[in-house]
Amino acid sequence: MDDHATISVKEQVSEQEWKARCDLAALYRLAFMHGWDDLFFTHISMRIPGEPEHFLLNPFGLLFEDVTASNLVKVDEEGNVLPPSRYGINPAGFTIHSAVHAARPDVHVVMHLHTDQGVAVSAQKRGLLPISQLAMNVMKDVAYHGYEGIALEAEEKERLVGDLGEKNLLILRNHGTLTCGDHPFAAYTRMYLLERACKVQTLAQSGGNDLIEWDTKMQERVYGQGEQAFTNDLFKEIGWAAIRGRVDRQSPGYDA
């Protein structure tokens, strides 16, 4: 009998990896709770602490509400699935996430979505507009990447990370949104702000009136005022504990 068949995933991985698995599974459940999931065609990844060449992705074909710490898939830089797992990964997800993780050692979490409002703004020539506090909280940190079709070609990686540079939010033209961070709270909060800003923008545009846009000086002021949410380590821990508590209540079982 295969020993791996009788030993739980938790028993086969390090304590650090298990914590990362639980945090990442919670992010998938949050995406489902917000209505950000696109069946199983988007992805969130997390680098494994102490193993910079390895990261975790969702099992391709499982809905976000079914993702758990145990069924997340561990991959290396070449896209090889490492045991223990009986699942595969989305090739396009690997292309995007492996590119960011390889180019940005400071990044531990990458979120990529295809929401209605995110895709709607990504299809607008001017992109995200400075018409809300939500937008100005992040737009100084937003980059753009031109559409090249479904992300299956390895050659796109260099262009994608070149466009991202040192920023932490990326609008993929005609495609969707991406955020990254050194902590699950940072990546999640950036996505929360970006997605809400996109929703507010599309709602405001539908009103048919002229929009109030703020200048670069105001954009920089608002960005600076809100920057602590992404730089204060204690706040990130407190905030993430609160958010995981919400997942515990509304979508239990992710940490199994």
Image (cartoon, helix red, strand yellow):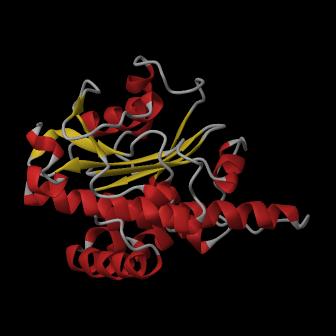
For this orientation, the residue located farthest to the front is 1
Residue at position x 18%, y 37% from top? Answer: 83
Q: Position of residue 172 (x, y in %)?
A: 56, 39
Report if residue 217 is visible in the image.
no
Image quadrant where one finds the C terminus:
bottom left
Q: Is residue 69 left or right of residue 17?
A: right
Instruction: Note whether residue 97 is visible.
Output: yes
162 versus 179 height, above or below: above
Q: Position of residue 206 (x, y in %)?
A: 86, 62
Which quadrant would residue 209 be assigned to in this image?
Answer: bottom right
Identity of the residue drawn at 57% across and 58% down: 36
Looking at the image, which residue is at 40% across and 26% down? Answer: 157
Is 173 placed above or below 236 here? above
Look at 44% across and 39% down and name the residue there: 60
Residue 9 falls left or right of residue 243? left
Q: How many marks?
A: 0
Quarter of the figure with the N terminus:
top left
Viewer-side residue, 64 vs 241: 64
Front one among 149 and 16: 16
In the picture provided, is 19 more to the left or to the right than 246? left
Foreground residue, 189 or 256?
256
Q: Position of residue 216 (x, y in %)?
A: 56, 61
Q: Position of residue 181 (x, y in %)?
A: 32, 56
Q: Is residue 114 above or below residue 75?
A: below
